[in-house]
Amino acid sequence: MENFVPYLIVALIQVAISLGIFGFVMVNALLLTLAERKLLGWMHQRLGPMEVGPWGLFQPFADMIKLLTKGDVIPKAADKFFYSYSALIAFTPSFITFAFIPFGLVGGIKLVAADTEIGVLMISAVMALSVIGIILGGWSSGNKFSLLGAVRTAAQEISYEIPKTLAIIAVVMLAGSMNVYHISSIQRVWFIAPQFIGFLVFFVSSLAEIFRIPFDLAEGESELVAGYNVEFSGIRFAFFFFAEYTYLFVTSAVITALYLGGGSGPEFLPWGLSSLFWFLLKSFAMVGFILWFSRSLPRVRADQLMNMAWKIMLPLSLVNIIWTAFIVLNENLLKIVVK
Amino acid sequence: MEEKIRTDLLEVNFGPQHPATHGVFRAVLTLDGEIVVGCKPVLGYLHRGIEKIAERLTYQQFIPYLDRLDYVSGFLNEYPYVRAIEKLMGIEVPIRAQYIRVLMMELNRIAAHLVNVGAQGLDLASMTPMVYCLREREYILELMAEVSGSRMTFNYFRFGGVKFDLPEGYLSKLDRFIHYFKDRLPEYASMLHRNEIFQARTKNIGILKPETALKLSCTGPTLRGCGIARDLRKDEPYEIYPTLDFDVISENTCDSYGRFLVRFKEIEQSVRIIEQTMPNLPEGPVMAKVPKVIKPPAGEIYCRVEAPIGEFGVYVVSDGSPKPYRVKLRSPSFSNLMSFPHIAQNISMPDVVAAFASLAPTMGDSDR
C-alpha cells in the first residue's frame, strides 16, 4: 500500500497536467479564431467581430455553442464509420504534440509534459498522423470536391514532410540532441541566424503542412468549395477546425523552440516565469506572422507546390545540412552558436 | 500489370452554387485527375425575361430594368438604350448632360473594373486586395449615389439628358476622390499582378487566340487581352469621347494575365478621362426638350457602347406606339462566356477558376 501512494500522486499530477494542456489547447484554439478574424479585419481596414460581448471577445464561444448545437448530419453517400471518426483522428494528434513542447523553466520545473530524448522526432511524427484523418474525412464524405481535396492533401503532406524533416535534422546536428527543451536552451545565438536556410525551409514546409494560404490546396475554397471538409458540419467540423488552429500554434511553438531560442530573453519576472512569458510571446508573434503572411498572398497550384517541394525545398534543405555540418565540424564556429 | 489499374474521368459540377462562379453560372467539367478535359457551360439560371418585359412597358419605364443587367455597371447599361431611342427620335442632348454622362460612365467603369480586378485576386485566394477594391468602390458608389440617388440601380439617364444636375460642390469631392484613388493603385498592383504567385497562376493560362476570340465575337478586355485594340469609345465614338485623350489598352499575351492587366490599366485610363472631363464641364441645361410621351417613329435601330465587360448593344424596333415592339440586348458577358470552353481546355481545375475570373462575366447580364 505504501508503495502505491507515490505512483498515485504521480498519476494524479499527470492527469492534472493533461487536463491543463487540454484546457490550454481548447482556449488557445478558440482565441486564435478570434485573433485571426480580428487581425484579418485590421488588415482589411474592418473591425472584425464586434457584436458578441465587449469588443467581440465572446465571439469564439458563440461559434462554439453554435457548432455544438448543430444537427449531426451524415451524408447518404458517406462511409459512416470513417466519416464519424476522421475528425477525431485529425484532432487527437494535434493535442498530443503539446506534450513535447517546452514552455519554459518555471521554479526549476521544466514545463514539458513528456521530456523525452526524441521530442522533435515525436512532434513531426505525430503531426503527420493528422493527415490520415484529413484524407479519410475527404474520401469518406462521398463528395467529389472533398475527394479532390483529400488526394491533394496526401500528395502535399508527403512532399513537404521530407524537406521539413531535413531542416529539423540540421537543427538536431547543431544541438546534438533531439530533446526539444535541450535544443531551445542550448542556443547561444538564436538558431535562426546559423540556420537561416533551414528556417526558411521549415517555415514554408510548415505552412504547407498546416494548410495556410499560399498552400491551402486541401481546402481551396475558390476551386474546391471547402476541400476535404465540404460535407462536415457541427462538432465534426469543429474538430477539424480545432486541429487546424492547434497546429497553427504548435508550428509557431516549434519554430520558437528550434529557431528563436525558446524561452530565452531578459529575465524580469521571479521564479523563471519570464521564460514562459518569452516563449508564449514569441510563439504568438509567430502565429501573427503566419496569419499576416498567409493573408497577403494568392494560392499556388498543386503542380507548382510539388515543384517547389522537390526542386527548391529539398535541395535547399540538403545544402543547409552541408552548411550545418561545416559549422559542427569547426569547433570555433560551434562555440559561437551553442552554449 | 498496368492494364489492371483503371482510372475514371470525374464529372464535376462547377456551379451554379459555387464560390467562384460569380453568380449562378454552371459548367459541367470533366476532370482527368485535376486536368479539365471537357467543359460544358450551362446558362440561364438568372433568366428573368427582361427583353420580353420591355415589350409591355413604355420606353421610360424600361430604363430601371437595364440597371439590373450587369449590376456592377448600371450607367453603362442604361446608356446604349437611351442613346438608341435618342437617335431614333433625333433628340439633341445638351453638352453638359453629355459631360455628366461620360463622367458617370467612367466612374462606373472604374467601379466595375475594381470588382472584377478584386474578384480575380479572390479567386486566387488572395482576399485582401478584394476588400481594398471594394473599399474604393464603396467611395465611388457613394459618389454615384449622390448624383443619381441610388448606389447601384441608378435610373438616372433620360431620353434627352440626365435626371438631375450635379449637386453643389460635387466636382471638388470627385477631385478629392481621384487624388486619393491614384495613390491606391500601386498598392493593388503590388498585391495582384506584381506578385510572383499571381503571375505564376495567370501567365500562359487560359490561352484565347485572337482568331478564336474574333470568331466567338468576344469584346472588351477579353478581346483586348488578345492583342486586338478594339474599343468602341475610339472606333465609333459617342458623346464627348472624340474630344478626350485616352489610350486603348491591349496586351499581346492572350492569357488570363493579359486580360487582367487590360482591366487594371483601363482603370488608369478612366481616371485620365475623368480628370479631363472635370475642369471642362460646361454650364447649361441637363435635359433637352422632349415630349412627355415618348413615341419614336416606326423603325429600328442598333446602338452599341463599350461597357466594362465588352460591347453592350441594344436593338430596338419601334412601331410608333409608346411601347417598344421589340428590344434585343446584346450582352458582352454572354458572348465572352462562349470562349470559356476554349479557355478551360486542358488546364487544371484551379486554373479554370482563375481563367473564368479573367473573363469577368456577370450572370445578370449574360442570362438577362
Image: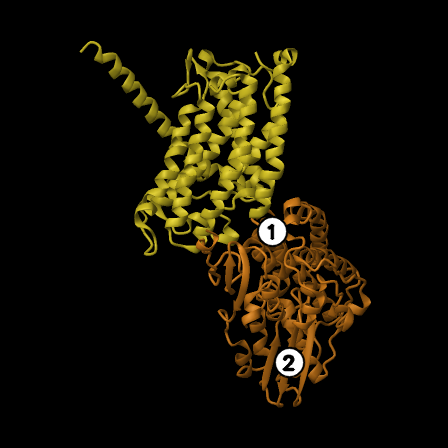
Which residue reaches farthest front? B1
Which residue reaches farthest top? A2
**Structural crowding at the residue carrying mark 2, measured as other residues with C-alpha within 10 Å and reported as few (<14), some (14–19) or many (≥20):** some
Marks 2 and 1 belong to one chain: yes
**Would you name the residue on which mark 2 appears?**
B315
Which chain is disc 2 placed on?
B
At label 2, the amino acid type is Tyr
Residue B171 as seen in the image, left or right of residue A2:
right
B44 w.r.t. B350: above or below: below
Which chain is disc 1 placed on?
B
Task: State the quadrant of the N terminus of chain A.
Answer: top left
Labelled pair 2, 1 in contact (Cβ < 8 Å)? no
Marks 2 and 1 sit apart, C-alpha to C-alpha, by 35 Å
Please give the letter of the chain rendered in yellow: A
Which residue reaches farthest left? A1
**Structural crowding at the residue carrying mark 1, measured as other residues with C-alpha within 10 Å and reported as few (<14), some (14–19) or many (≥20):** many
Image disc number at residue B245: none
The location of residue B138, given as percent across then percent down, is 60, 54
Image disc number at residue B121: 1
A104 w.r.t. B2: above or below: above
Q: Which of label 2 and label 1 is nearer to you?
A: 1
Chain B color in figure: orange
At label 1, the amino acid type is Gly
Q: In terms of secondary structure, where does tag 2 sit? A: strand
The one of A90 and B359 positioned closer to us in this rendering: A90
